Amino acid sequence: MRPVRAITLTALGFMTGMAAAATLVKRALPSRGDADSDEVALAAILDGVELESRSTAFRGGSMFSWYGGVAVDLRDAKLAPGAHLNLHSLFGGIAIRVPVGWRIESNLKALGGGVAIGVPEPEDPDAPTLTLDGFAAFGGIAVGARAGEAAFDR
C-alpha cells in the first residue's frame, strides 16, 4: 500500500507543479499579433488561441502551446520571401491551415506525439515557401491545405 500511496502523491505533486508553472508562464508570455500582423507570437497555455490571418506579407513568427491549442488559418495571407515559423507544443496542439500552392519545408520533430504535414507539393518551382522548425512533446502539430469557407470546421 505504501508504494501506491507514494506514487500517487508524487504524481499529484508533479501535476500540481506543472499547472502552477503553466500559470506563471502564461502571465509571462502573452500572445502578440492579429489578423493583419506580418509576424505573430502566439502562446496558448491552459487555453486556446485562434487566428485567421489576412497579412499582406506574412513573415512568420512563433507559436507555443502548453496544455492548450493554437489554430491558425493562413489561407487569406500572402507569404513574404523567407517566411519562417517556430512551433513548440508540450501536452498541447498546433493546427495550421495554408492555401493550396504553398510549399512547406518541415524540420519538425516529435516525442510521444506527432507531426502531420498534409500539404501537396506544388507544381510551380517558384511557389511561396514556409519553413517550419520546432518540436512537439506529448502533443501534436498539424499543417494542412484545403479549400473551403470555414477556417476550422467543427
Image (spheres, rainbow, N blue to C red):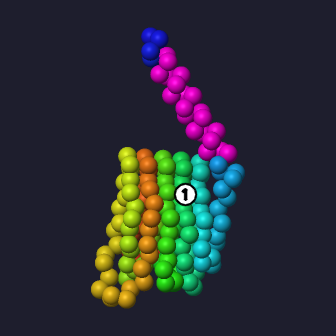
Q: Main secondary structure of the magenta part?
A: helix
Occupied quadrant, residue 63: bottom right
The quarter of the rendered structure image containing the N terminus is top left
Q: Residue 55: x, y in percent?
A: 58, 81
**Viewer-nearest residue: 54 or 108:** 108
Q: Would residue 149 appear left or right of 19 to someone viewing this image?
A: left
Residue 139: in magenta span: no
* Amino acid type shown at disc 1: Phe
Q: Residue 19: x, y in percent?
A: 60, 39
Q: Which residue is at a point 39% across and 65% down the rendered structure image? A: 107
Q: Which residues are magenta?
A: 5-24
| Residue beneath disc 1 | 64
**34 in relation to 23, above or below:** below
Q: Which residue is at a point 59% across and 48% down the rendered structure image? A: 46
Q: Would residue 27 appear left or right of 103 to someone viewing this image?
A: right
Q: Residue 137: x, y in percent?
A: 44, 49
Residue 19: in magenta span: yes
**Viewer-nearest residue: 73 or 7:** 7
Residue 118 seen in this snapshot: yes
Q: Which residue is at a point 51% across and 83% down the rendered structure image? A: 80
Q: Would residue 137 appear left or right of 53 to someone viewing this image?
A: left
